[in-house]
Image (cartoon, helix red, strand yellow):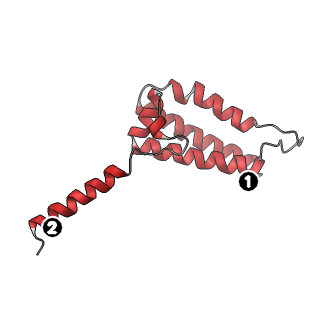
């Protein structure tokens, strides 16, 4: 049998542990430094934070493969990084609510995966 005092202590410890973990961390940025409304929404919604994390993993994988070098010419460039910045500024960051941000991420992740598979010859 669990004594009420033990239960209360365990619950208090669990709450304290969660409080010490601090704010959520979206993979693309530090939520403690979130300054735009979109970044704050991402940090406040676990699903959006998860999508940001997925987008960041995908971005890192592609950047790791290309290393900023054009596969055809060998020229040093980062077209995907520029495209990602353009998407963030013209699509994600114009959203005013969580559903819009979610749609933006879902569409972007699907498109990037499709384009990357095609670039690797997997879509043929």
Identify the disc placed on residue 51. none
| Residue position for label 2 | 6
Q: Nearer the viewer, residue 102 or 65?
A: 65
- Relative image position of residue 8 (x, y in whole percent): 15, 61
Cα distance between the residues tagged 2 and 1: 57 Å
Q: Is residue 117 visible?
A: no
Q: Is residue 16 above or below residue 94?
A: below
Q: Is residue 85 above or below residue 26?
A: above
Number of marks? 2
Few, some or many C-alpha atoms within 10 Å of disc 2 (few <14, some 14-19, many ≥20)? few
Q: Is residue 121 above or below residue 75?
A: below
Q: Is residue 3 above or below residue 68?
A: below
Q: Residue at x 51, y 24 (%)?
A: 94
Q: Nearer the viewer, residue 3 or 117?
A: 3
Identify the disc placed on residue 122. 1
Q: Nearer the viewer, residue 68 or 102?
A: 68
Q: Nearer the viewer, mark 2 or mark 1?
A: 2
- Relative image position of residue 76 (x, y in whole percent): 84, 39
Disc 2 secondary structure class? helix
Q: Earlier in the sequence, mark 2 or mark 1?
A: 2
Q: Give left or right: position of 11 versus 119.
A: left
Where is residue 96, by image quadrant? Answer: top left
């Amino acid at each position: 049998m669990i004594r009420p005092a033990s239960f209360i202590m365990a619950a208090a410890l669990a709450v304290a542990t969660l409080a010490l973990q601090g704010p959520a961390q979206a993979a693309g940025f530090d939520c403690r430094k979130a300054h735009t409304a979109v970044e704050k929404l991402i940090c406040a919604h676990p699903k959006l934070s998860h999508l940001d994390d997925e987008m960041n993993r995908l971005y890192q994988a592609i950047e790791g493969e290309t290393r900023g070098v054009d596969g055809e010419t060998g020229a040093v460039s980062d077209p995907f990084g520029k495209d990602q910045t353009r998407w963030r500024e013209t699509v994600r960051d114009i959203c005013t609510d969580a559903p819009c941000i979610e749609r933006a991420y879902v569409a972007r992740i699907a498109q990037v995966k499709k384009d990357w598979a095609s670039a690797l010859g997997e879509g043929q």
